[in-house]
Image (spheres, helix red, strand yellow):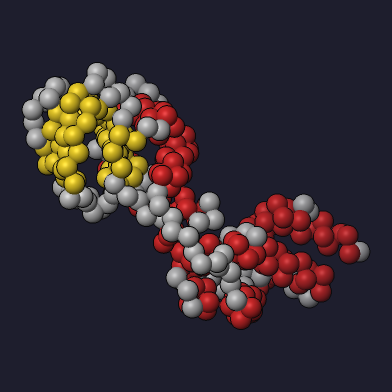
Amino acid sequence: MHDNWLETIGVAVESRRIAAGLTHYVPASINHRLGIHVGAPVNASCHCDGKHHRRVQSDGDIDIVPAGLDGDWKDDADCTILRLWVSPALVRRAAEDLDIDPDRVVVNPQFQRRDARIEHIAHALATGLNPDVPSDRLYFESLAKALAFQIIQGASKPEAPARQMLSFGQKRRLTDFIEANLDQDLSLDEMAQVAAISVSHLKVLFRRNFGMPPHQYVIRRRVERARTLLYQGKMPLSQIALEAGFAHQSHMAQCMKRILGVTPAALIRMQR
């Protein structure tokens, strides 16, 4: 298993040869585990989650064992398993990207799941085991996120009583807090405390109510603050950048150019 993969992209993978007749115990892990059967069919049995499963394991059959669950596996012939570990944190981030409350995503044990996308992603990730193949972190990160999306598709998501939104008071407290602290290093923990919700709920509900993640909203408000100060013409650009919460003048210029389409210098010229 490539531990550095788990740390950097949230997924690790290995190809493992299993000897016939070997009963191997797999202890509980802090990560979700996927086992994909590769090659000729075998008669297999496993004991997991208090249940005993006997089946013919065919090429592409996928077992998904959630974090915290152990089990025993046995096959009647030699076989190869493509095994993956998936960080629960990666699954939570993927749920947030899908505008799903991550606390509602429950990964359940699944046996002999057929999922061509998971199979394709797993084999693509496994190419990273080959030292002759150059590693591309962005490529593997996109594969890891796609794998997390597929896991979520098969996870149970108990229906919420209603589509949760921030209350009027929560929205007002958040906007007031952000405006009052634009020149500070704002954190999600602080914003969650202001709204009296968890950080994971804040990420989901903030995007749902404001149409963008918290960090994007804060950057946009800082750009607006800087534009107002520029129009007032009472401070040098370096001071305006600090007052608006940017790290430095060039950071402010980059954000203004991206969001407004013009640089601070262009805005000043437009006022003349």
Q: Is residue 201 above or below residue 175?
A: above
Counting every numbered tag in the picture gives 0
Residue at the image position 53 percent from the left and 51 percent from the top: 98
Expressed as whole percent of the image width and height from the top left, the position of residue 235 reads 74, 73
Residue at the image position 24 percent from the left and 38 percent from the top: 1
**Residue at the extreme top:** 40
Q: Is residue 36 left or right of residue 221?
A: left
**Residue 3 appears in the figure:** yes
Q: Is residue 180 left or right of residue 143?
A: right
Q: Is residue 125 left or right of residue 208?
A: left
The answer to which of 14 and 182 lies nearer the viewer is 14
Q: Is residue 203 left or right of residue 17?
A: right
Image quarter of the C terminus: bottom right
The answer to which of 18 and 180 lies nearer the viewer is 18
Residue at the image position 77 percent from the left and 52 percent from the top: 261
Residue at the image position 78 percent from the left and 71 percent from the top: 228
Q: Is residue 114 above or below residue 242?
A: above
Expressed as whole percent of the image width and height from the top left, the position of residue 171 reads 62, 75
**Residue 232 occupies quadrant:** bottom right
